[in-house]
Amino acid sequence: MPKRTVVGAGLSGMVAAIDLARQGDEVLVLEKEKAIGGSPAYHPSLHATPIDLQYTSDLIGIDVSSCFQLLSETQLWIRDKRLFPNLNHYGVERGDRETAIDTFLYKICLDHGVAFEFGHPVNRLKDIPPGSIVATGTMCTVEDFSVHKLIDGYGYAFVMDTKLGPANWQFADTYSPDYFYAVAMNGILYGLVFGRRTRIEEKALKTIDRQFRERAGIEIEGWKPFYCETMIGTRLFFGPGNRYIMTGSASGSYDPYCGYGIVGALTSGKVSALALRDRDGAQVLFDRMNRNHMYLYRVFEAITRLPPMVKLKMLTSMPAYYKYSKVLFGRMGRGIPGYPRDWMEEFTRD
Ligand SMILES: Cc1cc2nc3c(=O)[nH]c(=O)nc-3n(C[C@H](O)[C@H](O)[C@H](O)COP(=O)(O)OP(=O)(O)OC[C@H]3O[C@@H](n4cnc5c(N)ncnc54)[C@H](O)[C@@H]3O)c2cc1C
């Protein structure tokens, strides 16, 4: 029975572990935290993403649809203007609570006999056997895994109890080159404002507090500082002789439209398991999934360099060019596993 090591008990790592265990391999997952649910610095948290639940579940061989809820109440604001696109985002919970997708996948791992060692950080390649899958997420935590260019992201997040949901708010404003978002479901409300390469000033939180009070009728409590890294570039095989396999955010697998991470983590988890048996097939699938990566990165870079007011003016006038961007965005997502084929077409519908 082949022995396999997976580093990181997050989404991509557990999808890979389940797949390998189903093929009859003996799988050990090494996780740096003391328990399932990722870093307590980030979670519990609620994430929003477009996703084709049927396709994703079929592709990874795990029906994840019970973990996701359509965020039917949606508000998208560009400064003080509310736009009315059909966001069609789903919410999903991360962390160690019963309602989190981490807990859901962990139980399936245990049912398949996957072994876990918690409190076991892997700091160097030499500590794991060749053929290991590296699924360490957005932070580059292992010194010699740093095969990507990294961009720092800074911000603030909060999590509080609520009876609301499922609901989603997204605000673009001068306080961030990226955005603020909040999601309510499973009895909690989670919000995050962040900026790549830019520190969000503390005074911005007062503006968001006011906006959220006016738009959602809720007083935000408990902001905490937040730090993350984004990988630039994608990679499936790496290390001496390309003997290791990367997956999830560590591999640079992100959303083909917006740079989100959930669907890329789930689908690339499956691809990393495939890579141990069919290198070429896995590489073809991986390249297809990530074909927009560098293009999106350059577009984001260009937009980030625009003066904030010019960028926001462009975003506010989006409805005027919805129908023109439809074709371009439609092509961006088409055929990429896990994403709704028509998501951008829906989004850009008048
Ligand atoms: C606060 C926050 C908000 C986000 N919001 C969204 C959103 O709204 N929509 C969206 O689609 N995406 C969002 N993302 C991105 C998305 O969550 C990630 O892209 C996705 O979870 C990545 O999955 P993964 O499997 O690569 O890593 P993760 O699920 O993060 O798992 C990585 C695991 O590896 C462990 N680990 C790390 N280093 C080591 C080590 N050296 N040794 C052993 N174990 C290690 C970690 O503790 C963790 O358990 C967000 C990310 C964060 C942090």
Image (tube, rainbow, N blue to C red):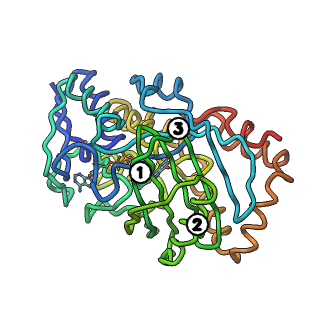
Nearer to me, 210 or 88: 210
Q: Is residue 261 left or right of residue 37?
A: right
Q: Is residue 302 above or below residue 191?
A: below
Ligand 1 closer than 8 Å to the CB at disc 1? yes
Name the residue beneath numbered marker 3.
166
Which element type, helix, strand or loop, lies under badge 3? loop
| Corner quadrant of residue 30 | top left
Q: Residues within 10 Å of mark 1 (few under 14, many from 20)?
A: many
Q: How many numbered marks does the figure carry?
A: 3
Q: Residues within 10 Å of mark 2 (few under 14, many from 20)?
A: some
Q: Where is residue 38 drawn, in percent x and y?
A: 28, 49
Q: Residue at x 59, y 52 (%)?
A: 216
Q: Amino acid at mark 3?
A: Pro
Q: Residue at x 60, y 69 (%)?
A: 177
Nearer to me, 279 or 182: 182
Mark in the foreground, 2 or 1: 2
Mark in the foreground, 1 or 3: 3
Query: How far apart, in angstroms, are the residues tagged by discs 2 and 3?
Result: 22 Å
Query: How far apart, in angstroms, are the residues tagged by discs 1 and 3?
Result: 26 Å
| Corner quadrant of residue 123 | bottom left
Q: Is residue 67 left or right of residue 177?
A: left
Image disc number at residue 249: 1
Which element type, helix, strand or loop, lies under badge 1? helix
Mark in the foreground, 2 or 3: 2
Q: Is residue 263 visible?
A: no
Name the residue beneath numbered marker 2.
210
Query: How far apart, in angstroms, are the residues tagged by discs 2 and 1?
Result: 33 Å
Q: Residue at x 67, y 69 (%)?
A: 302
Q: Where is residue 248 drawn, in percent x and y?
A: 40, 46
